[in-house]
Image (cartoon, rainbow, N blue to C red):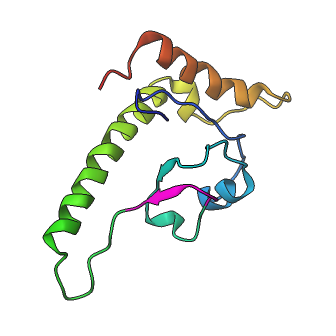
Amino acid sequence: MNALLTILFLSDTYGGRVHEKRIAAATPYPLPAGSRLLQDLGFLAFTLPQVAILMPTKKPRGQELPWEQQLANQALHHRRLRIEHVNSSVKRCRIVKDRIRLWKAGVRDLVMEDPVATDGLIGINSY
């Protein structure tokens, strides 16, 4: 997703219960060198070459976070919130969140590509 909140990349679809970290490790991401990747704590060991990883800082046990870290976490939270709004606008298309029973090759990927393309055309991502 870029600064204009347009979805630029979709991985292949996976059936069953596959953790997102395993999908991320198996997918070649087309991020250029110098990019920044916002990720959450479910992807702790995931890295990409020449890409800066932005992740919130956890509070140490029994201690408080320094004020600077709290402000940094809040800034990441606001960015992540905008991204989640875009994701939810794609999921408004019911076919994306329901179980897909289409078994023909390539059709499952089209089910996700159409709502993403429609989201960009309609301009829902004006948050």
- Depth order, front residue of 27/75: 75
Q: Is residue 122 left or right of residue 30?
A: left
x%, y% of residue 75? 25, 51
Which residues lie in the magenta part? 48-55
| Residue with the most extreme bottom position | 62
Residue pictured at 44% horizontal, 35% vertical: 87
Characterize the magenta stretch by its predominant secondary structure.
Answer: loop
x%, y% of residue 122? 44, 11
Q: Up-down: is 83 above or below 59?
A: above
Q: Up-down: is 35 above or below 59?
A: above
- Depth order, front residue of 124/102: 124
Residue 33 among magenta residues: no
| Residue with the most extreme top position | 122
Residue 68 in view here: yes
Q: Up-down: is 64 above or below 41?
A: below
x%, y% of residue 16? 70, 52
Q: Is residue 112 left or right of residue 121?
A: right
Residue 17 in view here: no
x%, y% of residue 82? 33, 37
The quarter of the image holding the C terminus is: top left
Residue pictured at 59% horizontal, 63% vertical: 47
Q: Is residue 47 left or right of residue 107?
A: left
Image quarter of residue 74: bottom left
| Residue with the most extreme right position | 105
Q: Is residue 91 left or right of residue 114?
A: left
Residue pictured at 32% horizontal, 44% vertical: 79
- Depth order, front residue of 83/97: 83
